[in-house]
Image (spheres, rainbow, N blue to C red):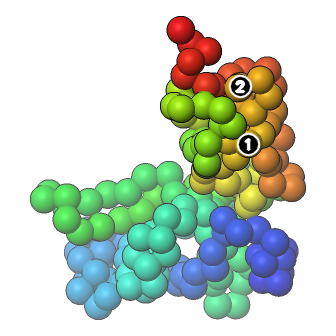
């Protein structure tokens, strides 16, 4: 996939990385002192690769909530990865290391995603939101972090899971008739 393809994958961020020639705590400490973040890539029938990247750039993307990356290496192919695990310092205030696992951006997976009701259900004084999340199926490249459903989509005071607007490439796994929210007076 080219970087132009990433324009259609909103959850995937490009990040430059360099393969590490030396591994171990001494070399990792030297990398961190030089503003680099040590990491490792594994999984999907590939060899384990020790890498490092610019700490500021990586932290900027991580702080924006991104967990799926296309790592670019000088002179070799890119690798699509997601964060598997973070390792923090003993006080939990500084990131020491990241474990990445290779992913296939076209493979669909199931995931629970938060759903939020926007607006009011017509005729309702209060709304009971019975489900805070729904299960969907999507590739990592288009997997939404959260979903919204408008209150005015309610039928007879009930918002069902099938009323949640899903982006292209995202399928509902939760039963469509499951009640996400309803007019609180109906619960009585």
Figure check: 131 above or below 139: above
Looking at the image, residue 110 sits to the left or right of residue 64; the answer is: right
Evaluate whether residue 137 shows in this view: no
The answer to which of marks 2 and 1 sits earlier in the sequence is 1
**Position of residue 135 measured from the top left corner of the image (x, y, whole percent):** 68, 33
How packed mark 1 is, by other alpha carbons closer than 10 Å (few <14, some 14-19, many 20 or more), is some
Res 183 → quadrant: top right
Badge 1 element? helix
Q: Nearer the viewer, residue 72 or 125?
A: 125
Q: Position of residue 95 (x, y in %)?
A: 30, 67
Q: Find the residue positioned furthest to the top.
A: 188
In the displayed orientation, state which residue is furthest to the left.
91
Badge 2 local density, few (<14 within 10 Å), some, or many (20+)? many
- Spot occupied by residue 144 in the image (x, y as percentages of width and height): 67, 54
At 46% across and 58% down in the image, what residue appears?
Answer: 99
Give above or below for 24 relative to 124: below
Position of residue 62 in the picture relative to residue 179 (left or right): left
- Residue 152, label in figure: 1
Q: Residue at x 13, y 59 (%)?
A: 91
- Residue at 86%, 55% in the rendered image: 168
Q: Distance of mark 2 from mark 1, alpha carbons?
A: 10 Å
Q: Is residue 144 visible?
A: yes
In the displayed structure, 12 sits above or below 162; it is below
Q: Is residue 47 left or right of residue 57?
A: right
Instruction: Name the foreground residue: 7 vs 152.
Output: 152
Q: Circle 2 sits in a helix, a strand or a loop, which is it?
A: strand
Residue ID for mark 2: 158
Image spot of residue 154 (x, y percent): 75, 33
């Amino acid at each position: 996939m080219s970087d132009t393809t990433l324009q259609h994958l909103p959850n995937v961020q490009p990040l430059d990385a360099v393969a590490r020639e030396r591994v171990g705590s001494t070399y990792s400490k030297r990398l961190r002192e030089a503003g680099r973040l040590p990491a490792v890539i594994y999984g999907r029938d590939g060899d384990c690769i020790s890498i490092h990247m610019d700490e500021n750039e990586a932290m900027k993307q991580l702080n924006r909530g991104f967990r799926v990356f296309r790592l670019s290496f000088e002179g070799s192919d890119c690798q699509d990865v997601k964060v598997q695990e973070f390792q923090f310092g003993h006080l939990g205030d500084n990131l020491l290391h990241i474990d990445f696992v290779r992913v296939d951006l076209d493979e669909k997976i199931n995931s629970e995603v938060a759903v939020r009701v926007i607006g009011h259900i017509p005729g309702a004084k209060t709304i009971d939101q019975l489900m805070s999340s729904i299960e969907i199926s999507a590739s990592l490249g288009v997997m939404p972090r959260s979903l919204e459903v408008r209150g005015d989509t309610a039928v007879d005071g009930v918002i069902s899971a099938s009323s949640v607007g899903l982006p292209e490439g995202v399928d509902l796994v939760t039963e469509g008739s499951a009640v996400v929210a309803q007019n609180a007076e109906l619960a009585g």
